[in-house]
Amino acid sequence: MIIDTRRASSKTYDVCVIGAGAAGITIASELAKAKINVLLCEGGQDDYSEESQSLYKGKVVADPELDVAYSRLRYFGGTTNHWGGYCRPLDEYDFTECSFDSSIPAWPINKAALSKYLGEACKILEIKNNFKDQELGSYFNQVDFKLSGPVRFKEKYLDVLKKSKYCELLFNANLFSLETGGNYIQEATFKTDTNKDFKIKSKFYILATGGMENSRLLLWSNKLSGGRLIQNADTLGKYWMSHPHFELGRVLMWGDKDPLPDGLVNYSPNKDFLDKNKLMNITLRVDPILRADPIEGAAGALTVPLHDKDQLKEKIATEIFKIAPFLAQGLLDSGYKVFVRQLLGIWEQVPDPNNKIILSDKRDRLGMPTLELHWRKKKSEYRAAKTTAYEFAKFIAVNNLGRVKLSDWLINEKDPPVDNEEHLYGHHLGGTRMSTSSSSGIVDKNCKLFNQSNMYVVGGSVFPRGGHANPTLTIVQLSLRLADHLIRKVKA
Amino acid sequence: MVKRRTILRNMTSGMLVLSGLGLLNEKKEHSKAMKPEIVTVDGWVLLSSDL
């Protein structure tokens, strides 16, 4: 049921979950099913409001500067209210220590620790649990991504949790600080949207406010506690990562019929290729985004303005047929239809302590410092994209599957064009990373805060490495695992 | 070298149909006799036999 602050403050819960996005809702739902008394706190309400969203305002120091509020939604369901639905578990390789850079850590758990929860996570996200990758030559795999509905957690769980006997929902509950008695969280202070304080007591607390707010809230609470909350905070807010998305080129394909009739297809280099070339993981996505109009697609492949059909004709004749006349003649002789696809690269970033969330000197209207995200991409990331795209282009050509035209920025060793930056911000990883030691991370293998016996953090912020897969499925797996852990703890 | 070119759009299927292109036959025969290698021209990653 939905409750008010007076009722919430009058009780001691088994578990207080802070944040009602994919992670928080998954955990609250699982705990309620196990008949554990849980309070689910949401800073916003059950629908979007500018007033709530404005609390996400902050500064980004990046190349170029971007809106930190973009790609996040501050109401029940969180980012699942607008996510795209792409799902894939992390690769085995993503959990391991990097073979060529010892500063890149392994996860303190292996893939099997999360695989146990894959089936249930797939049910939650309404996708089939039959991920099958196929080897493609010596260096690549065709990798399987599933597309969720996408499931909107608000639509799926709000009414269910309202009716739950064991889960109480509290809206306009904005976490302000966590009070520690040394190694135990005694209570949490929240503020209403009208800036009134109230306290929540619980046996266990879970912070699940997303890949930026988890860091911000812990940085602020730790500051208020004089460093007692997180005694070794060297890595707090640091090693923040995303999955940069950029167009790497266009793929010209042909056949009697569409060679990729099922839509987009994803490829990824195997471990041998990554280790040999000292590269982080990457997805190459051949996207039929241009399929709706093959003429315009062909124009795009040739970097012609899409609206200019006269120029298109001229460019087709004077570029590809001039550059590769025998390829063109072969196509004409065969009578094949020609298709043009976009080649996207979506890559893993090297964890870098200089990419970080810090507290700014500005305050939001509830009195908490706004966040400042420092995030810059490295030239080495572009080398990874180029190396992989070029190898892929060679594979495509040698096997006569098509031909690839690599983007100018990639060929000329330039930064990607700024107008592609809109793709950059969807995935928020790191900042409170999981580790074997408090000297290199913020939470242990069970997502528990080091030095605090009853405080957990979950979400993209605990990823030590990001892999190349969209993170939501992994976040739901981690949440199910944490719920399982807490059910055992509460019932012990 | 391209001597003649036309591009027809198949409005029914929406696919791009390319036709009517004449090419220098002697260059094609020369290219066929060689083992194709990867070449990059203006960003296109091609086989030498394409050229």
Image: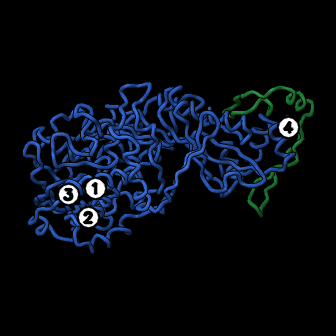
Chain colours: A blue, B green
Res A1 label: none
Q: Are marks 1 and 2 in contact (CB under 8 Å)?
A: yes
Amino acid at the residue labelled 4? Val
Amino acid at the residue labelled 3? Asn
Alpha-carbon span between mark 4 and mark 1: 67 Å
Q: Does mark 3 fall on the same chain as mark 4? A: no
Q: Residue at x 16, y 52 (%)?
A: A176
Q: Which residue is mark 4?
A: B2
Q: Which residue is mark 3?
A: A174
- Between disc 1 and disc 3, whose residue precedes? 3
State the residue lying farthest toward the right.
B26
Q: Which residue is mark 2?
A: A34
Q: Position of residue B5 (x, y in %)?
A: 85, 45
Q: Nearer the viewer, mark 2 or mark 3?
A: 2
Along the line of sight, the residue nearer the viewer: A188 or A247: A188
Q: Which residue is mark 1?
A: A483
Mark 3 surroundings within 10 Å by alpha-carbon count, few (fewer than 14), some (14 through 19), many (20 or more): many
Q: Does mark 4 fall on the same chain as mark 2? A: no
Left or right of A43, for residue A154: right
Amino acid at the residue labelled 1? Ala
